[in-house]
Amino acid sequence: MPIVDYWKKVVLERYATFEGRARRAEFWWFWLANVIVFVVLAVLAGAVSNVIWVLYALYGLAMIIPSIAVAVRRLHDTGKTGWLLLLGFVPVVGPIVLLVFYLLDSTPGTNQYGTSEKYPTG
């Protein structure tokens, strides 16, 4: 699926959905789209005016909830609780542990968070 489809699926349809599961592709496409938008806005802000910095800040604020939601769903897909997202506050080690969790494959079949889209009959 193209990046626009993942963007619509995660941001528009599942904006604040913390239940369910998110496959690796959904998670990483979401982050790639965000990085692209942030880079474009940063370049424009440096070249154009301070007005773009306001858009940059507003976009960043608007993406807080969907970013947390997709991260929680990604942890659910690996069979882990969304509360593990708090590991991000542990200096150095926490973000590394979260990155490893984000890179893990989906748990096959059904777990306590729902049925896997990748392995529906595990």
Image (tube, rainbow, N blue to C red):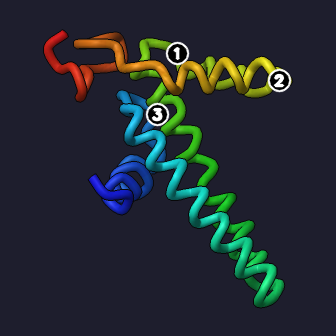
The number of callouts visible is 3
Residue beneath disc 1: 81
Q: Amino acid at mark 1?
A: Thr
Is 8 rendered above or below residue 97? below
Side of 30 relative to 91 (left or right)? left
Q: Secondary structure at mark 3?
A: loop
Residue at (48% x, 42% y) in the render:
28
Q: Along the polypeptide, which appears first: circle 1 or circle 2?
A: 1
Is 122 rendered above or below residue 85? above
Q: Quadrant of residue 109?
A: top left
Query: How far is the residue under mark 2 from the one under mark 3?
Result: 26 Å
Which disc number belongs to residue 19?
A: none
Residue at (36% x, 20% y) in the render:
106
Q: Position of residue 24 (x, y in %)?
A: 41, 33
Which disc number belongs to residue 92?
A: 2
Q: Nearer the viewer, mark 1 or mark 2?
A: 2
